[in-house]
Each structure stands twice: as structure tokens, then as C-alpha cells.
Amino acid sequence: MRATSQLRLAALALVTATSLSAQTIAITGATILPVSGPRVENATIVMTNGRITAVGANVTIPADAQRIDGRGKWVTPGFINSATTLGLSEAGSPQFSGGYSDGSARGDSGIAASFEAWKGLNPANTYIAPSRQEGVTSVLVAPNGGMIGGKAALIDLVEATNAAAMVRKAPVVMVGQFSSPDGGQTNARAEFWAKWRTLIADVRAYQGRRAAFESGNTRDFATKQSELEALIPVVTGQLPLVLDVDRSTDILAAIDFAREMNLRIWLSGASEGWMVAREIAAARIPVFTGAMNNIPGSFDQLGQRQENAALLRAAGVTVVLIGNGPGDPGSFNVRNIRQEAGNAVAYGMLWDDALRAITLAPAEVMGVADRVGSLQVGRDANVVIWSGDPFEFASVAERVFVQGKEFTAKSRQQMLTERYLTLPPSYRRP
Amino acid sequence: MRPTPLLLALVAAGCASAPAATVPAQAPIPTSTTASPAPATPAAAATNLVPGAYSRPNADPFPSTYAPFPSRPTVIRNVNIFTAAGPLIRNGAILIQDGRIAAVGASVTAPDNAVVIDGAGKYVTPGLIDTHSHLGVYPAPGTAAHNDGNEATAPVTAHVWAEHSVWPQDPQFPRDLAGGTTTVQVLPGSANLIGGRSVTLKVVPSRSVQGMKFPGAPYGLKMACGENPKRVYANRGPSTRMANVAGYRSAWIGAEEYKRRWDKWLAKPEGDPPSRDLNNETLAEVLRGNILVHNHCYQADEMAQMIDIAKEFGYKIRSFHHGVEAYKIADILAREGISASIWSDWGGFKMEALDATKANVGLTHVAGARTIVHSDDASYSQRLNQEAAKSLAAARVAGLSISDEDAVRWITANPAWALGIESKVGTLEVGKNADIVLWSGNPFSVYTRAEKVWIDGAMLYDRLDPSQRWRTDFELGYVPNDGGNR
């Protein structure tokens, strides 16, 4: 096989690098995209003890800093993929493959509000390293299924021995859906939406009458106690509720529902969001959607188009880009969030908005912008050095720092690739 | 948030299984320049071969009615040309006339009446070709009523033909064209050991599937290894890989016997002909070399076994599909002359997809195997250029040296070979069909979009002219006009 030895040596150096977290690291001479402000050419960023301590064109570099030549490179915050089951599943169906699938709970008649999916996350999941290697440093780990899938958490892609050590914020949001009556064990939209209203009303009733409930002096509620408890932060507005929606009418219904029940909601999917973009913008509801799906895959997605994200953004909606196409964008191909951003640009989004939609926008929506999503002094050093425009296929995430630490793990995919780059002697026999 | 679409798709539909087809013999396409299968019997040589030559009484029961759309002589000047047959021509020109490529090079002489397009800063490639599609058989919207890709009622269904399931009004067809994909092989799914006949289609508007059929393209036979058949038939068998293999062999044994009976009668057609059997008719045509085998197979060890089965019965495998482990046996694929139709970056979704690596395409390519980036997906099929770009980048990260020109062949010339239509499409060479894409920029950039697409010299997609855009019957009144922008 032909191989470029320099590249391979570089790759080797990368994977054998030791932890740099305790050091001061300065990336110099780079094009820096802080997201929180305009890009700065020929700039320096300094990371110390896991935090960003300086960034800009005129930075004094500490004498003890390890310097990385960033000339010709682009530096961005680590990307955030805001719709994943990363770490919750591997190898497909457990019944058939023996793998694991921990993204959806049985729940109570379609309601699994108390389900904290991230607690079952496997830090040894082999899809984590490839995600990080392509510049993703944080992901929202979200459950799915039913009417209410459970709670989602934001995790940082650090190496860890347990899930708790990876959690950036938990919970971030309650995950539900508003356009599939089936998931709520109902037959019709209006029936489903009525069930939602009853549920929210019951949570409020329960909240006010806990003691009476304990002594058996309340009427029956729509779900069991553990779920009612879990939904209290939603009805008090502490915890947002993200609703999966597709059809434009469902989006409007969700907006009405949130207004009427006084809930803080986000929308996810929103295939036909562009058709009601003004209403979404007026309601100041952020939308999680992608830019690589134009297929009218169901009668609820007839208006699906790749310009959706750009049109929503143009209407003033806060857009968080997620994978909405095929190819397992929420697990095996979490790494493809940069392709999603590139396609968003190809289909009309401003480049800066696309970058923001996978960095600072989700950080702000999730309430963690003081820590991640931008390159500002005091933020955690989730920093990626790119060989060029990060959305381009040819560009490589050359160095990835999470909380100031450069990762060292080689992915399983790399191990397989390296094994077969030169067939091992034991495999050469006929 | 919703479960990942890939898993749903695989369980419910496309990739999961394939029906088998039978029936009339299929002629090899004439004047193939590369290794097209040759007629295997004297009878074949003696017959005036047309699709279905061995079937009696009707040799070609569903003939193509495709005819090129009206075209005008067109020259694209000052454009970068990936011919898929040589080095990139910078600031060159290409002339299309009478549906064919009339000239291509640094400059061309164009007739006075030619439409002149300035391609400054843009790129031209051959129309992209997808060896693995389920357009029309798993159309959008996804409904049980149109779930027509897997005849999952028996492990060997070589008697079914994918074309009989194709819904030409599938709104995914025009979206594919807008992505620069001009030819697709529509396959049965992968539920079955032998799933049925595939059909190669031009991505064009038509009221019937016959109007889309690529004239002269050989049929394919869909076969499937591994998990899907044994999962689908767990209760009645095959429920193991060893039973999968027994199932293929039994089917071929029956086909050999059938073929012997027919060959004998064809050599001396006296008395009543033998009975027709649609299942064996298709399999016999594979044994005669007239139908190309497309074998869904993920694991290296299973591909090695399928190669032995092919040798036992004397047929050739034209392409392994999905082959997430193709890189492990790429040297063997190269030696055996079998192409690899593989994904850029799918994997992990089942046990047999566990060893996927993004370097698969690159590793397979450098080992000398004919490498193809395929989709198995209506969305990826619209972005084959992006899929190839990802594979090219991953190969370079792995230290492999592959040219842009080679990567273009993964989605043009190589799939054309796998489908047996390489003498007609897949490269931009004089005399070939003018299936051409004009890209807004380098096709390996994420920001690039197909701007104009020609099939047989007729411009069927123009991004700049929405009023002429192909909208299927289904879309009228359902898909908003703006939503039809693509």
C-alpha cells in the first residue's frame, strides 16, 4: 500500500501525546473563531489548567507555555452535537447482536419522565473517540420513545471511568413529542394533545397536594408518582421541555400548548418549521433541526426541505443544528455534525450562523454558555485546531482539547485501519 | 428526540433483505469495453440475444420504452472537467450533441447553434451512478401500502423483479436527479438469500417504470449474506449462516439442472419445450453470464465463502454490496475482479457492521479492487459526491495517497462497470451518452451543489430555473411549491 509516511508519523505522535492538562498551552499565529466575537487572524489562544486564559491578536504568552504553531490553522470551540444517544447504544439490537441499547425506557404508558438516560451511558463506547477526533467535544445525550422519553444531559467527551465524570449539566431538558399520537398511546392528535394538557394539569395538582396524595386523599392522576415528581421542574419552568414535531400545524399546536400551560419549550425536528417561521420566532422558541433532509418521508413531513434551518434562522429563530438525515447521526456518526453545518451553508445559512448553531447557540439554549461554546477567557478549554475550514471534508481536526486535555485514545476504527494498512504476518498465509 | 433513522430503515426496509427474481434471459450489453460477462453457452452465441432471449414465448416481457428527451447542442466552456477517464482538465470545454459527448478537451469546436454555457469556476463530472438504491420500491412517504422492496415470504425468491415494485411517482427520484445522480440500480431488499432481479433506471420522469429502464442494461440478481436472512427466517430457517450457505447452494443446484434441460432443448428444439420456472429462469441466466450478481455481504469471511460458491457453480460476482469489511480482503477482491460497493461512513448498527472504518473505501481502492461509494439510502444517494469526499479525506488521514480523479471514479466509472453499462456512461469520453453534471464548484466541497444535470444530452435539472423543475404527481397539492425547491 502507498502511504504518506509523514502523515502517519504525525498521527502516531498525536496518539502518543501525554496529558497536557496541567500545562499551559499556547496556540499561536492561528485564525481563531471565538464565535462570541469576530474571527481574529494571526491570533493566539492560551489554555492553562483546563481553562482559556487568553485569546486575541495581542497576547502575552507565558514563558513556560508549550507552544503550538497555529499558522495556517483554524481554531474553533469544540462542537456540540445536540441530539445524540452517544454512549447509550452499540452494535444494534441487544436481542440479536448482544450489544446494548439504553436510550429508551419502558416508562408508564408512554411517559418516562423520571428516566435519566445518561446514567446508563458507557464511557467505553467505541463511538465516542471518533466523534471527538472530528472535533465534537460535547453532546446532548437524550432518551427517545413514547410521549415523554425522559431527561437529557449534556456530557463532555472526556475520558472517564464512569458516566458521572463526563456530565457537564444534568438534566438539561425533558424530552417529549407532540406529533405522534401513537407514542402517547392515543389514536388522534386532538386526543393526544388533550392527554398532554391533562398530564400537565395533574402535575400541578399533585405538586399542590403532595401530602394528600401520600395519604391517598386525591383523585387519580394521569401517571404514577415518580413521573409526576419528575415533571414538577417542567411545570415550574425550571426545566425546559423539548418537543419533537414535524407538521406545521403540530408546531402551531405546540406553541399554543406551551403558552396556555405556561411551559418553556424548544422544538426538535420541525420539518415544516419554515412554513411557520414567523410564529416560532415570535414565540422565541429555539429549534433543533438539520440541513440534510428534503424527503417527504411521511404525511407529516411533506414540506421537509434542506433550507429549513436557514429559513428559520433568517426569520430570527435561534437554530441549533442537529443531524436529521440517515446514517445514524446521533450515535455512530455524531462526527458528521460538521457536514450538517456545511450543508446548512450550502442551503442558505450564513457561515457564522452555522458555526454558532453547533457551538454557542446550543450552549446558550442549554444554559452552559458560561463554560462551553465559545473561545473566551474563563471558559473551559474545549478547543479544536483544524487544518482549514472545519466544515470542509478535506479539513482535519488536528488537535482536540477537552477541558484543556488533549485526547490520547486511539479509536477502534483506527486500530482496525492500522492493522490492515499492512496485513499482519499471521494473516498473510493463504 | 427521535430514534436514529438508520436503524429504523434497516429493520423496516431497504438494506434488510432482497427478493430473488427469475425469468427470461438477459442479454449481455453489446460492445462492452471492460469485463462484461460473456455468453456462457453455444446456444447463447447462436441466438439473437435480447433481454430474455432464453425465455419462451416472450423474450423481453417488459422492454424499456425510454427515449432521450429533446436536447440542443450544448457547449460548456471554461470549466474544470473530471472526465473519470484521465486527469482533471482545467478550464476546458465539453460539447454535447445528439445526446452524446461530441468533444471534450482543452478547447472544442462547437456548431453555431450550440447553447453556450460559461463554466468559470465550476466543475463538470459524469452523471453520478448509484449501484444500491431502493427508490421506487421503498418510496416516500413511507407507508405499508408502498412497502414493496422485500418479498420476505421465502428465503429464495429469484422469481420476483424489483421493477414490478417501482412507483415512478416516488418524489425521491427528482431529488436524486437534483443531486447529480443520473442512473440508479434499484434492488430488492436483503431479507432473502436470493432476493430477486434488480433493474437499472435512468432518473427521469415517466408514467411507467419501462420509461425509466436503462436501454440495454443487464439485469442484476440480489443476493444477501449474514444476519438479515437468518434473522428474518429464524423460525423456519435458515436460522444460521451454515443454513444460509446451504440455501444458496441448493438454489444453484436446481438452476443448473434447469439450465441443462433448457440448453438441451435450445440446441435441438424439437417437441414440447421444458416447463418454465420463473425462479430458475433468472438463476440460469446468471449461470449463462447474462445477469450480474450483486451480493449484499458485510463480513470478509462470508465474502470469501461467497466467492467459493460462485466458483462451484461457475458464475461471477459483479459487486459485493455494503462490504464494511471489504478492506480486510481487498487483495482477494482485486484478484477475483469483484467490485466493492460500500458506504463512506456507516457502521456499528449491527454485529456484522461492527468493524466498519471510514478508511474502508481508501484501503479497498489502494489494494487494487474496483471501489464504489454507494448509498442504500434516498438521502445519501443525493450526495454521492459528499460521500466520496468523506472517503477521500479519511483515506488521506490514514496516509493513503489517492487522487481526486480516482475518487471521482468511485461514483461514476466504477459503478458503471458494476452495472454493466460502462460502454455507455460513467466517463466523459467522446461517443458516450451525455449524462453530465455541472457543479457550482469542486464536487468534493461541502458547499458545492449540482447546478445543471443532463441525461442523454437533455437538460433535465436546472437549479436556476425552478419553473421547469420535475415534480412527481404525488407532489402536486401535497408538497408546497417552495418545498419542492432543490
Image (tube, rainbow, N blue to C red):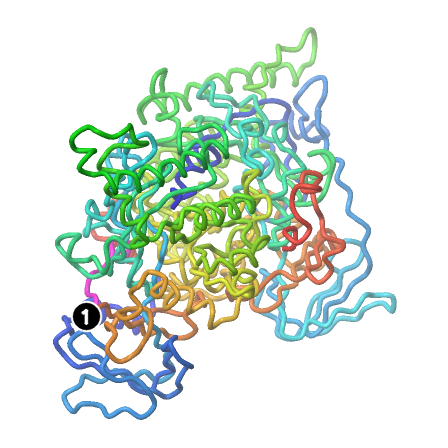
Q: Residue at x 18, y 73 (%)?
A: A50
In the image, residue A355 lies at what x, y percent? Answer: 43, 69
Q: Which residues are magenta?
A: A406-414
Seen from the viewer's position, the closer of residues B279 and A102 is A102
Q: Pointer 1: what residue?
A: A405
Q: Is residue A409 highlighted in magenta?
A: yes
Type of the residue with mark 1: Lys
Q: Nearer the viewer, residue B136 or A215?
A: A215
Q: Helix, strand, or loop for circle 1?
A: strand
Where does the image place residue B274, in percent across and percent down from the top left? 62, 10
The chain letter under disc 1 is A
Q: Residue at x 52, y 70 (%)?
A: A350
Does B55 sit above or below residue B372? above
In the figure, B124 relative to B336: above or below?
below
Residue A378 location in percent, x, y? 23, 77
Give the image quarter of residue A223. top left
Position of A67 compared to B203: left or right?
Answer: left
Quarter in which the C terminus of chain B is drawn: bottom right
- State how many labels appear: 1
Q: Residues within 10 Å of mark 1 (few under 14, many from 20)?
A: many
Residue A73 image point, x, y percent = 36, 79
Which is more toward the observer, A164 or B310?
Answer: A164
Q: Was residue B348 drawn as part of the magenta stretch in this picture?
A: no
Given residues A257 and A348, the one toward you in this image is A257
**Residue A218: quadrant of the picture:** top left
Residue at 44% over, 67% down = A391
In this view of the protein, can residue B35 be seen by the observer?
no
